[in-house]
Image (tube, grey):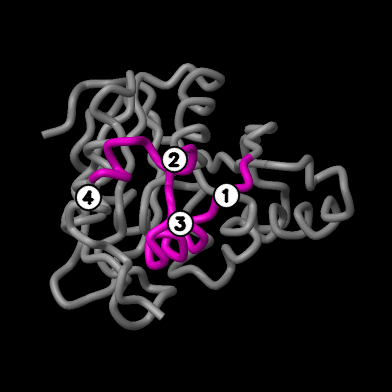
């Protein structure tokens, strides 16, 4: 299924829906880290979000496929990959599944936002993540230098078992777009232009996604 690529980025999330901020991060990471490709995977059943998602996994995967179809080096990783039947989907299990499927010489980079990084200790088997992939954080506003440096350093030391774990940083991923705002606009029938790729906006309109959420 997966190609023989030595440097692979993985960007997970609910992608409900995928928007320009996600794509900007993926593109910047691919360019700055010289990644051969970035897999974007909508979580099938996010462990940190109980209950159903606003849009089904099939819709979220279809939107990622549309958003990446003309984006060089970006690809959809199906939600089912690495998932275990009847269980929430966990990043650590996804990375284990990828490493089991990829050639041994490949290197994984797991991309995540600063907010997710600051909640990392609530994740399933979080201490194992740096052993499976290099963590790469989208530092949108230079937060390491603006009041969170000490908290980030403590988190890195816990990840590394006392010594600071190696983490990559992609600075300058600035966007005011959020998935919750997009869902709200879709519910009210407002334009999504400039927030999602046009093909994603057309898909949301075609299937009436987010119209019934409250």
Horizontal side of residue 101 vs 156, given as left or right: left
Mark 2 and mark 1 lie on one chain; the one further toward the N terminus is 1
Mark 4 and mark 3 lie on one chain; the one further toward the N terminus is 4
Q: Which mark is residue 113?
A: 1
Q: Which residues are magenta?
A: 175-202
**At numbered mark 2, what does the secondary structure look like: helix, strand or loop?**
loop
Gap in angstroms between the C-alphas marked 3 and 1: 18 Å
Is the Cβ of the residue at disc 2 closer than 8 Å to that at disc 4? Answer: no
In the rendered image, the vertical position of residue 29 relative to residue 163, given as above or below:
above
Q: Closer to us: mark 4 or mark 3?
A: 3
Mark 4 and mark 1 lie on one chain; the one further toward the N terminus is 4
Per the image, the residue denoted by label 2 is 193
Q: Closer to us: mark 3 or mark 2?
A: 2
Q: Is residue 188 magenta?
A: yes
Gap in angstroms between the C-alphas marked 2 and 1: 23 Å
**At numbered mark 3, what does the secondary structure look like: helix, strand or loop?**
helix
Q: Quadrant of the C terminus?
A: bottom left
Q: Closer to us: mark 2 or mark 1?
A: 2
Horizontal side of residue 3 vs 210, given as left or right: left
Q: Residue 38's quadrant in the figure?
A: top left
Is the Cβ of the residue at disc 3 closer than 8 Å to that at disc 1? Answer: no
**At numbered mark 4, what does the secondary structure look like: helix, strand or loop?**
helix
Which residue is depicted at the point 40% across and 33% down?
Answer: 9
Which residue is depicted at the point 80% across and 60% down?
Answer: 151
Q: Which mark is residue 65?
A: none
In the rendered image, the vertical position of residue 106 relative to residue 204, given as above or below:
above
Q: Nearer the viewer, residue 191 or 210?
A: 191
Q: Quadrant of the N terminus?
A: top left
Per the image, the residue denoted by label 3 is 182
């Amino acid at each position: 299924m997966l190609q023989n690529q030595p440097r692979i980025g993985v960007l997970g999330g609910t992608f409900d829906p995928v928007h320009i901020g996600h794509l900007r991060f993926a593109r910047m990471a691919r360019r700055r880290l010289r990644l051969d490709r970035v897999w974007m995977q909508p979580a099938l059943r996010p462990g940190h979000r109980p209950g159903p998602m606003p849009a089904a996994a099939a819709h979220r995967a279809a939107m990622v496929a549309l958003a990446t179809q003309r984006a060089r080096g970006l690809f959809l990783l199906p939600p089912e990959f690495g998932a275990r039947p009847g269980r929430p989907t966990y990043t650590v299990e996804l990375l284990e599944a990828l490493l089991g499927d990829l050639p041994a010489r490949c290197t994984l980079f797991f991309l995540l936002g600063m907010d997710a990084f600051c909640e990392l200790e609530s994740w399933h088997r979080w201490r194992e993540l740096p052993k499976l992939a290099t963590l790469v954080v989208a530092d949108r506003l230079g937060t390491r230098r603006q009041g969170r440096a000490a908290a980030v350093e403590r988190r890195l030391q816990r990840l590394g078992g006392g010594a600071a774990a190696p983490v990559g940083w992609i600075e300058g991923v600035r966007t005011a777009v959020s998935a919750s705002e997009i869902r709200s606009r879709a519910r009210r029938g407002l334009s999504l232009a400039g927030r999602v790729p046009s093909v994603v906006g057309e898909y949301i309109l075609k299937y009436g996604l987010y119209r019934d959420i409250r």
